[in-house]
Image: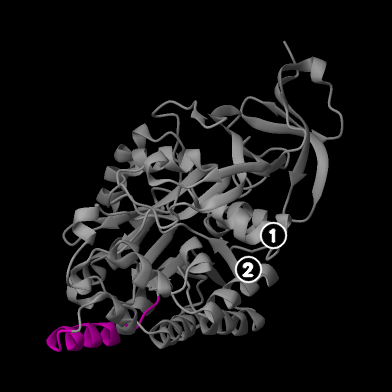
Amino acid sequence: MTKYDTVIHGGMVVSSSQVEVLDIGIKDGKIIAREEDLDTNDAARVIDAAGLYVLPGALDPHYHPQYGDDLTQGSIGAAHGGITTLVPYIYAYKGMSLGGAVDQAFGDGASSVLDFGAHVAILDPPNQVDQIQDVFDRHVTSFKLFMAYRRRGMMAEDDMLLDAMERIGGLGGVTMVHAENGLGVDYLEQKFQREDKVSIEWFAKSRPPEFEFEAVFRAIQLARIAETPLYCVHQTTGRAVEIIRQAQDTGQTVIGETCPQYLTHTKQILIDQGPLAICTPPYRSEWDMDRLWDGLAEGTMSTIGSDHSPHARETKLNDNVFKTPVGTPQVETLLRVVFQRGINEGRITLPRLVSICCENPARAFGLFPRKGSLNVGSDADVCMIDPRRLSVIRAEDMHTTVDYNTYEGWRLLGTPVHTLQRGNDVLVDGKLKADLGAGEFIPASTGVPEMV
């Protein structure tokens, strides 16, 4: 019997602190060695990683399986993009129990090709906040609340936010917020529709940047009172970055997430691509985009999530933008887009990429060090990227149920060519090797997360 099931040999191993030419030894799905020149003769197989960057498998902490792609389909797309762990939202709709929603989602995840964690989105706060303990009992410790969408019955008023935050923080979990001033959005949407201002240029105007950073500031104050870690999803504005930094400077645990669409496009995309590109919050200015990249580079912003939520073309092409479903396909392109815009264009370093896309998402949601790390003892989830391999984004090549992509025609240098999950091949030269059902639910631990 060999010492190693697999040795990854001669690659440029990237951690959150450095890049080193090392070998990685894998046995029984775990990393058991990480050093120079392992004995390849004592390995059942050797992967030649010379010239490749060897990263921990990426995590997508912001995935919606309720729309065009369920968890199975989404895991296939994510796998083709170099991701090895998904953390999807479980929606607990009005009338559903939180525990029941989790149980149902675990059943839906049985055919995932990737390992997965979970967040619970509380959509009926008055009737569901009392059930938070039931979710912890199922080893899910992160909860999303909405500061918008009152007309859909999803919005948590400030008193309900504070109540939920106290309960979640008291149990060692993380409160996540969709931070927009929901009452302001409702007012402007109704006003614009009364005035027949329903064409594409009015969409972003109904959700101005002030609504985001006001809500971020308010959520931070409530989280400080509740003494709970706060995770601010899909941040789009430079001002929100400043507000998050100010809170972090006081010692408060506030984790900032942004998404690839806000790092690559301004609101001009709505004019160029129309309703197909609509997402919420909307795209912002070049200045905001630059501040988001700055925040990622210096550590204020900690994670990137795809916010993958595609909808069929026919439902998106609506004459009234306020009746257009929001969301775009993002999961399969996430890592390549961030590598192109971040690494190739000099906005972030390789170690910072690992922090943002691998280690910090795992740390934020109680999955580290099992996930997001190439240290001894971690799961052997590995993504090998060829920095010289070019890919061209075409919707027809994507593994999603929709037939459009906001990055259509983009040429991206740096392609995942080989990924492993717990030591098993997931993607090899663009071919999916993992079987349906290969993924497992990864239980989350509790505690205050520390970002790197």
At a point 82% along the width and 45% down the height, the residue shown is 20
* Residue 418 at x, y percent in the picture: 61, 33
Q: For mark 1, what is the residue?
A: 352
- Is there CB contact under 8 Å for labels 1 and 2? yes
At a point 43% along the width and 46% down the height, the residue shown is 394
- Mark 2: secondary structure: helix
Q: Nearer the viewer, residue 401 or 140?
A: 401
- What is the number of the mark on residue 257? none
**Where, by quadrant of the figure, is residue 127 drawn?**
bottom left
Residue, far right: 37
Q: Is residue 292 left or right of residue 348?
A: left
- Mark 1: secondary structure: helix
* Residue 450 at x, y percent in the picture: 64, 64
Name which residue type carries label 2: Leu
- Looking at marks 1 and 2 on the same chain, the residue that comes earlier in the sequence is marked by 2
- Residue 370: in sight, yes or no? no
Q: Give the distance between the C-alpha atoms of the residues marked 1 and 2, in whole angstroms.
A: 8 Å
Q: For mark 2, what is the residue?
A: 296
Q: Tell me the chief SS of the magenta region.
A: helix
Which quadrant is home to the C terminus? bottom right
- Residue 119: in sight, yes or no? yes
**Where, by quadrant of the figure, is residue 255 drawn?**
bottom right
Q: Nearer the viewer, residue 356 or 379?
A: 356
Decide: few, some or many residues near mark 2? Use Cα within 10 Å; few <14, some 14-19, many ≥20: many
Up-down: is 10 above or below 302?
A: above
Q: Which segment is the magenta one? A: 179-196
* Residue 143 at x, y percent in the picture: 39, 62
Q: Is residue 274 left or right of residue 420?
A: left
Decide: few, some or many residues near mark 1? Use Cα within 10 Å; few <14, some 14-19, many ≥20: many
Q: Nearer the viewer, residue 261 or 356?
A: 261
Up-down: is 309 above or below 12?
A: below
Which quadrant is home to the N terminus? top right
